[in-house]
Amino acid sequence: MVLLCRSFSGWIIGTINNDSTSDITNSGTINNCGTFNNNGTFTGNPVQNTCPPPLPSTFTVPSATGAGPVTFATPAGGFSKLVAVPQSGLSPTPPAGSYPFGFFSWSITGFAPATSVTLTITFPSPVPAGTQYLKLVGGTWVPVPIVISGNTIIITIQDNGPFDADPTVGTISDPGGLLVTTAEGTQQLINTINGMHLSSAITSNLDWKLQGVVSSLNLGQNSGAKNQLNSFINFVNTQTGKTIAQDQATTIIQGAQNIINAIQ
């Protein structure tokens, strides 16, 4: 047998066996991440003993809302994809509510197929009790069981189980994000604003307005809270391009609108 390899370029992971009756002529590139047993004739370009770089088991990305960096870690496999996704880029639209860190789309592979994978997500600020993690599966947003500890959550997902968005065996995928209660979501919005490095005067003004919203929510005055948030959005619009940059204003207004949408 004569094997001509004129255009191959990539990795072979495993074993290449060239028996004594075979000739291999390599005119391209063979990267072998395994064993090459040559008992025949091999001519042309040599086999490169290289392996693909391992997938990262820990990955940090900035949140789409500007709330700070979020770190994902898994003890099994690695991340083939991890990106922050703005809420406006999701279809179908997530349920009404406050998503202070936005959403993330990720895929984990390289683990033993048909097993469970544990994912630890670390946020830049504490995760309030009662927070849910919503995940898009089969076109429907569903809550996934999580364990909350300080500023981290732990998720366990079974490969091809009910919370795995990817039918491929050995790959778990997800677009998902944290949904917090309205009062806690307002506090998270305050935390986000405090991290934007606006002037002390505008930061104090925005914080004061939102603390009023928190007070109304804690007293059950939902209608008043909505009115306060609408006034807050109007104020941010008057400051856009002046004391607040356009991208920062967009993040702030989206956060406030999410809270309005979540108030019953």
Image (spheres, rainbow, N blue to C red):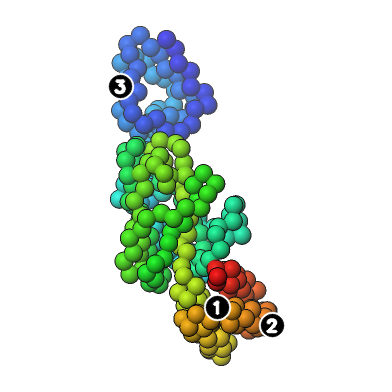
User: Which residue lies at the image location 59% right of the left edge and 68% below the top edge?
Assistant: 261
- Note whether residue 120 is visible: no
Q: Nearer the viewer, residue 249 or 232?
A: 232
- Note whether residue 75 is visible: yes
Q: Quadrant of the N terminus?
A: top left
Q: Secondary structure at mark 3?
A: strand
User: Which residue lies at the image location 34% right of the left edge and 37% below the top edge?
Assistant: 114
> In this picture, is 114 found above or below 236?
above
Residue at label 1? 222
Q: How many marks?
A: 3
Query: In the image, which is nearer the foreground, mark 1 or mark 2?
Result: 1
The answer to whether the residue labelled 2 contacts the one labelled 3, judged by CB atoms less than 8 Å apart, is: no
Residue at label 2? 238
Query: In the image, which is nearer the foreground, mark 2 or mark 3?
Result: 2
Query: Cα distance, mark 2 to mark 3?
Result: 72 Å
Q: Secondary structure at mark 1?
A: helix
Which disc number belongs to residue 37? 3
Q: Nearer the viewer, residue 168 or 72?
A: 168
> In this picture, is 106 found above or below 7?
below
Q: Nearer the viewer, residue 24 or 174?
A: 174
Query: Cα distance, mark 1 to mark 3?
Result: 73 Å
Residue that protrudes farthest toward the bottom in the picture: 201
Q: Going from the N terminus, do you reach mark 2 or mark 3 first?
A: 3
Q: Going from the N terminus, do you reach mark 1 or mark 3 first?
A: 3
Horizontal and vertical percent position of residue 115: 32, 40
Give neighbour class at mark 3: few <14, some 14-19, many 20+ (Cα, 10 Å). few
The amino acid pointed to by label 3 is Asn
Q: Quadrant location of residue 160?
A: top left
Give neighbour class at mark 1: few <14, some 14-19, many 20+ (Cα, 10 Å). some
